[in-house]
Image: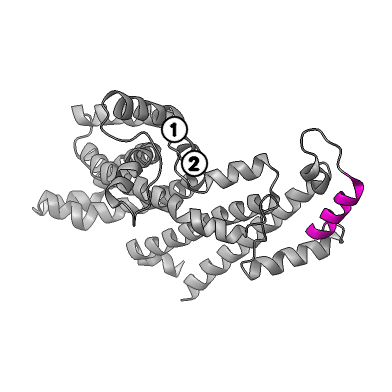
C-alpha cells in the first residue's frame, strides 16, 4: 500500500506541475489575451470592451491571485466556460472524450492482437522468412506518417473497393453496426505505429529471455515449448513490453488529433483545433490538462501492471 501511495502522490505532484506550466505559459504569451480575443478581422477593439473582458477573465488581478483561483477551480473540476460560445468546457470535454478514448482503445486492441503474437513468433523463428518480412513491415509502418496511411486507407478501402465508409460518426445507441464500421478505419490508422513499436519490442524482449540460462535449463529438463513460454518466457518478456505500451498509449492521446481530423471522427481534436484558431484559452487549457491527466493515469495503471508481473517491484 505504501508503494501505491507513493505512486499516486507522484502522479498528483506531476499533475500540479503540468497545471502550473500551462498557467505560466498562457501568461508568457506576448500580447494581451483580451485584446487578441477581440481583435477579429484586423479591427482594433474598443478599450472599454477590452477592460470589461479583462475583468471577466480575471486578467486585471495580481498573477498570484489568478494562480490561486486557477488551482481552486481545478480542485473543483471547474474548467470554466468557452470564450466563443460560453459553453462549459468540462461538458464539452465529457461529451467528446469517450469518443477519443474509444478510438484509442480500439487501436490498442488491434495493435496488441497483432504485435504480441507476431513478435513472439518472430523471436521463436529469428532469422526466418516471417521474422524478416514482419520486421521490414514494422519499419515501414513506423516511418509512414499517420495522415498518409489514413489517406491511403480511405482511397483504397473506401473509394476504390468501397468496403468501408470513408469517415464520419454514428452514435452507438442509434446504429451499432454503422458505428463500428466507421470506427474501423481510424482505429487501424491509430494502431499502425503502436503495432510496429510493440512488435519490435516484443521480439527483442523475447529473444533476450530465450537466451537466458533458466530458459535453457527448463528446456534441458524436457519441458514442452508451450510450458517454457508460458512459465518462463512470456511473463518476464512482458515487463519491457508493458513499459513501451504504456508510453505509446499516452502518446496516442495526442496522436489521435490527425486521425480524427482525417476521418472526421468527433473526438477532442475538433474543439481543440477550433479553440486554438479562435484563441479560446479556457477550452485549450481544459483539453491540455485532461490529456495530461489521462497520460499520468495510464502510467499509474502501467505501474500496477508491473507489480502484477513482478511483485518485487513493490519492494523497491
For this orientation, the residue located farthest to the top is: 160
Q: Residue furthest front?
A: 174
Identify the residue at image location x=33%, y=48%. Answer: 179
Asked if the residue under mark 2 is in contact with the one under mark 1, i.e. CB atoms within 8 Å, the reply is yes
Front-most of 205 and 182?
182
Q: How is the image coloured?
A: one colour
What is the x, y in percent for residue 121? 20, 40
Q: Residue at x 35, y 44 (%)?
A: 183
Which sits earlier in the primary sequence, circle 1 or circle 2?
A: 1
- Residue bearing the label numbered 2: 255
| Occupied quadrant, residue 78 | bottom right
Label 2 neighbourhood size at 10 Å, few (<14), some (14-19), many (20+)?
some
Is the residue 55 above or below the residue 129 in the image?
below
Q: Position of residue 181 (x, y in %)?
A: 30, 43
Magenta stretch holds residue 53:
yes
Residue at 45% across, 50% down: 100
Horizontal side of 36 relative to 176 (left or right) equals right
- Camera-side residue: 70 or 56? 56
Asked if one can make out residue 205 in the rendered structure from this viewpoint, the answer is no
Mark 1 Cα shell of 10 Å, populated few (<14), some (14-19), many (≥20): many
Instruction: Answer whether residue 269 is visible to the viewer in this image.
Output: yes
Q: Secondary structure at mark 1?
A: helix
Give left or right: position of 231 versus 5: left
- The stretch in magenta equals 46-59
Q: Is residue 173 above or below residue 195?
A: below
- Viewer-nearest residue: 44 or 235: 44
Q: Which mark is residue 146?
A: 1
Coordinates of residue 108 in the picture (x, y in percent): 36, 48
The quarter holding residue 158 reads top left
Q: Quadrant of residue 309?
A: bottom left
| Magenta stretch: includes residue 150 | no
Amino acid at each position: 500500500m505504501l508503494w501505491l501511495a507513493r505512486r499516486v502522490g507522484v502522479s498528483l505532484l506531476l499533475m500540479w506541475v503540468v497545471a502550473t506550466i500551462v498557467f505560466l505559459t498562457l501568461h508568457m504569451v506576448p500580447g494581451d489575451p483580451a485584446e487578441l480575443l477581440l481583435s477579429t478581422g484586423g479591427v482594433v477593439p474598443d478599450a472599454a470592451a477590452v477592460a470589461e473582458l479583462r475583468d471577466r477573465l480575471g486578467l486585471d488581478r495580481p498573477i498570484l491571485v489568478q494562480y490561486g483561483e486557477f488551482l481552486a477551480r481545478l480542485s473543483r473540476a471547474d474548467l470554466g466556460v468557452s470564450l466563443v460560445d460560453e459553453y462549459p468546457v468540462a461538458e464539452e470535454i465529457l461529451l467528446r472524450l469517450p469518443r477519443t478514448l474509444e478510438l484509442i482503445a480500439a487501436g490498442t486492441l488491434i495493435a496488441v492482437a497483432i504485435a504480441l503474437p507476431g513478435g513472439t513468433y518472430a523471436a521463436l523463428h529469428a532469422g526466418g522468412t516471417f521474422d524478416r518480412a514482419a520486421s521490414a513491415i514494422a519499419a515501414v509502418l513506423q516511418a509512414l506518417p499517420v495522415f498518409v496511411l489514413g489517406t491511403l486507407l480511405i482511397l483504397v478501402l473506401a473509394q476504390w473497393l468501397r468496403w468501408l465508409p470513408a469517415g464520419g460518426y454514428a452514435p452507438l445507441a442509434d446504429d451499432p453496426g454503422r458505428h463500428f464500421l466507421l470506427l474501423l478505419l481510424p482505429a487501424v490508422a491509430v494502431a499502425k505505429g503502436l503495432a510496429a513499436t510493440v512488435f519490435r519490442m516484443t521480439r527483442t524482449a523475447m529473444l533476450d529471455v530465450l537466451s537466458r540460462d533458466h530458459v535453457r535449463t527448463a528446456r534441458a529438463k524436457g519441458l514442452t515449448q508451450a510450458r517454457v513460454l508460458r512459465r518462463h518466457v512470456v511473463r518476464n518478456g512482458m515487463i519491457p513490453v508493458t513499459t513501451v505500451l504504456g508510453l505509446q498509449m499516452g502518446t496516442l492521446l495526442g496522436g489521435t488529433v490527425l486521425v480524427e481530423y482525417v476521418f472526421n471522427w468527433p473526438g477532442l481534436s475538433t474543439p481543440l483545433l477550433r479553440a486554438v484558431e479562435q484563441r479560446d484559452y479556457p477550452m485549450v487549457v481544459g483539453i491540455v490538462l485532461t490529456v495530461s491527466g489521462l497520460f499520468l493515469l495510464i502510467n499509474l495503471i502501467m505501474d500496477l501492471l508491473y507489480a502484477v508481473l513482478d511483485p518485487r517491484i513493490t519492494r523497491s
